[in-house]
Amino acid sequence: MRKFLLTWYGITDFRASLEFEHTDGPIAAALAAGHYSDVVILCYTRADAAPDECAATHAAFEHELAAIRAAGHEKDWKTTADFVSRFANTEAAHRHFERWLKKKAHEIGRFSNFVFKSERLRELNDSEGIYACAIRALDLVAEQSGDKLVTLYLSPGTPVMAYVWSLAALARPGLKKRLIASPVIGKPPETVALPAEWLDRYGVNQRAIRHADDGFDVTFHLFGEQRMPALLGIRQFESKRHIFVNSKAFPASCMQPFLSDGQPEELNVDPWDARAVRERIMHVAESLSPDDRIGMNVTGGTKLMFAGALSAARALGAVPFYFDSQHRRVTFVDSLHSSAIKPVDSVETFLKLHGDGLTIEESGVAEVGSPDRLRLTEALWKHRSEMTKHYNRLCEIRNKHRNRRQATAFRVQCGSFVFSMDDNHAATAVVDDLNLRFENWPDFASYLSGGWLEEYVYLHCRPYEDRGVIKDLRINVKLKLSQKAGHERPKLTDFNELDITFTDGHSLYIVECKAGNVTQDHVMKLQNLVRYYGGVEGRGILACCFGPEREAIRRKIENAGLAVCPGPSFSDQLKTLMDGIAARAGSVGVA
């Protein structure tokens, strides 16, 4: 069996290595008292220490230490304290301690494999950073093959480091481990145990987490302005009941379409009172069976709602979980175990979630497959400069048809190109050597005034859908929006059509296509569409024949976080965007 010792090294160990102490320090004492095949030592490195300390710093360390020894000041507290204050927690100190400890281990007949890991922290008591370092060290051991026993040494380092070792021990129940501490400096360490009640409660919670994939009897969802966390919770874990913990400002009625058992249950709380949130959840839980499995989705709402709900979850033995949209993982808060978020593959799911009662009049299934129509679309893209010159004139014809709600005959010449439609809606197009006729095309004017660009973009996105990079690619999704807007949400009756939309399984992408000049109104419209229908994870793409010329518009696009695919570099920009989507999916293992 391999025996591992995991520990920080602290100031007492450092002083011992400098011969400023009367003892060899806690770590050397532990090595003398036990036999370890492997020793992993975490070395706290100050945040202000240069990543690559120059040779002069190391030389200064050795020079000043030699001067102290030459003067016989090793036991002079002020002199040694000044030296330690200057050099402790630096790479020079780590290098010295490593040499000294290996030599000391050899002298006492301990031939362990040593691993020294320099760990930078924001501050000495950076609990989150310390926890991450401890978990990384445990994971390093867990990756080793064969039977192993891990000893966590609590004495070296700060009290926070000792406390975090205890938490880390609980977070990795699969590793065989023990905790030791030195009761007196210079004495051998002793085995210590965590409180039985703590272990029992944590063990129950860990068993619940391990069975979380089986679902829950009741799931509480913190619910606020952002709706996606609640939807992810409903989709991720089956549950007989869903209770939405919300304020009156954010009713949960919008979640009804995603529940199989009718109206959602709401638990109204004061979002700024953590104690009240805890008490309200605990009160509802009193009516539950002791055997009910409880899930606690703590992703939404305010930070104080999070605090209250997390406290209630721990008191109830519930499983608190949090959706990390950036890394596409759902994390179980009390164990830091995580799993992949189940993807949302339907555009309609996003639209229904954020649309406040909208209905989809046309689903956006493309009708662009005619060979002649494809040839015409490619020809117009090739001659987009000429089409842009006549954009306003083509829009007038389109608007005339829309106002009359009837497509009437027209003939228009755009440079050397000629387009026409007769009373029977038969359309013709003469472009270069193309002379095409289409029997029934009542929306021909809409196509000429920009629809061709939408179809061009759609056609160039489709190969990425075929490869699985994106999902549910739609074109011209028409939305019928209620004149009565949702609570606290603006009326969107102007925004009743999405040019192109798709999803990568985690975000809704909306593409706005502009065959004419790009204006600030176009940018604002796309920004609003993304915010209303995509939420905080929504993405917007502006596809245009030519990039915006005005600096103010370019700056507004950048500030809005929108992507731009302009004509001259359209294919390259689209590929870069799609490669980014694919890379992000691959990096989180959900491609």
Image (spheres, rainbow, N blue to C red):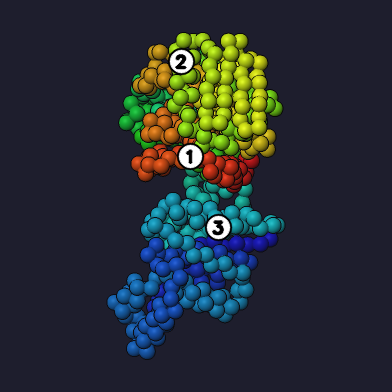
Q: Callout 2: helix, strand or loop?
A: helix
Instruction: For the residues labelled 3 and 1, say whether their Cβ atoms are less than 8 Å apart.
Output: no
Badge number at residue 400: 2
Instruction: For the residues labelled 1 and 2, say whether their Cβ atoms are less than 8 Å apart.
Output: no
Amino acid identity at mark 2: Lys
Amino acid identity at mark 1: Phe
Pick the front one: 528 or 147: 528
| Residue 92, horizontal then vertical, whole percent | 44, 74
Q: Which residue is mark 1?
A: 546
Task: Using the rendered view, name the quadrant where residue 572 is placed.
Answer: top right
Q: Is residue 309 above or below residue 176?
A: above
Amino acid identity at mark 3: Ala
The residue shown at (54%, 55%) is 136
Left or right: 383 as drawn, with respect to 557:
right
What is the crowding at mark 2: few (fewer than 14 residues within 10 Å), some, or many (at least 20)?
some
The residue shown at (51%, 55%) is 134
| Residue 569, horizontal then vertical, whole percent | 54, 44
| Residue 138, horizontal then vertical, whole percent | 57, 55
**Whether residue 332 can be seen here:** no
Badge number at residue 205: none
